[in-house]
Amino acid sequence: MKKYTVDQLINEVRSIKGNLGIAFTYNEPTVFFEYMLDVAKETNSLGYKNVMITNGYIEEGPLLKLLPFIDAFNVDLKAFTEDFIISRHVRTGTVKQTLLHLQKAQKHTEITNLIIPGLNDSVREFSSMVDWICNELGRSTVLHCHDIFPPSVDKTANTRFYFVTFF
């Protein structure tokens, strides 16, 4: 994989005819926060758009530094209940706080939720998540639902069908 300095990446962005901007993704972009911030500031000043696809685990200080330079976000809300999160050694509170900051800053925000059969696919949990999104972020917030296809779970199709028919 080729590594770019900020200037090299900006030159690459400018050389692509019709380019709208940059999407920071494929690895959690907060891992290279300083680089992302430098690139986003520069591309923003040149009129390009910046998009961040993230797991949402970012502290308030760095997020507030980044907000003026990122135009849109897609945040993975991997699960909604603390029971699910705690059993997997992560917490959902930080992600919810990130989403609230994005809403307050009036950033275009889309949420991606991974539905895992038998782990986070209850109607109650999903309904709670949708209610929270509508009440806290607004009814126009985009929600993408993805399901997982583990080879050892044969109820995936049933789970997918159930959600579609329920909602």
Image (tube, helix red, strand yellow):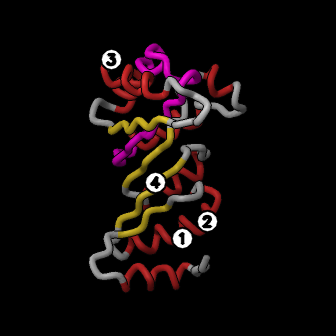
- Classed neighbour count for the residue bearing mark 3: other residues with Cα under 10 Å, few (<14), some (14–19), many (≥20): few
In terms of sequence position, does the residue under pointer 2 or pointer 3 come before the other?
A: 2
- Residue 34 is tagged as 2
Q: Is residue 122 magenta?
A: yes
**Residue to which mark 3 is pinned:** 166
What percent of the width, then of the height, locates residue 138?
32, 31
Mark 3 vs mark 4, foreground winner is 3
What secondary structure is found at the residue carrying circle 3?
A: helix
In terms of sequence position, does the residue under pointer 4 or pointer 2 come before the other?
A: 2
- Classed neighbour count for the residue bearing mark 4: other residues with Cα under 10 Å, few (<14), some (14–19), many (≥20): some
Q: Which residues are magenta?
A: 105-128
Q: Are marks 2 and 1 in contact (CB under 8 Å)?
A: yes
Q: Amino acid at mark 3?
A: Phe
Q: Amino acid at mark 1?
A: Asp
**Residue to which mark 4 is pinned:** 67
Work out whether residue 122 or residue 95 is closer to the camera in this orientation and state it: 122
Q: Are marks 4 and 2 in contact (CB under 8 Å)?
A: no
Work out whether residue 69 or residue 14 is closer to the camera in this orientation and state it: 14
Work out whether residue 85 or residue 139 is closer to the camera in this orientation and state it: 85
- Residue 38 is tagged as 1
In which quadrant will I find the C terminus? Answer: top left
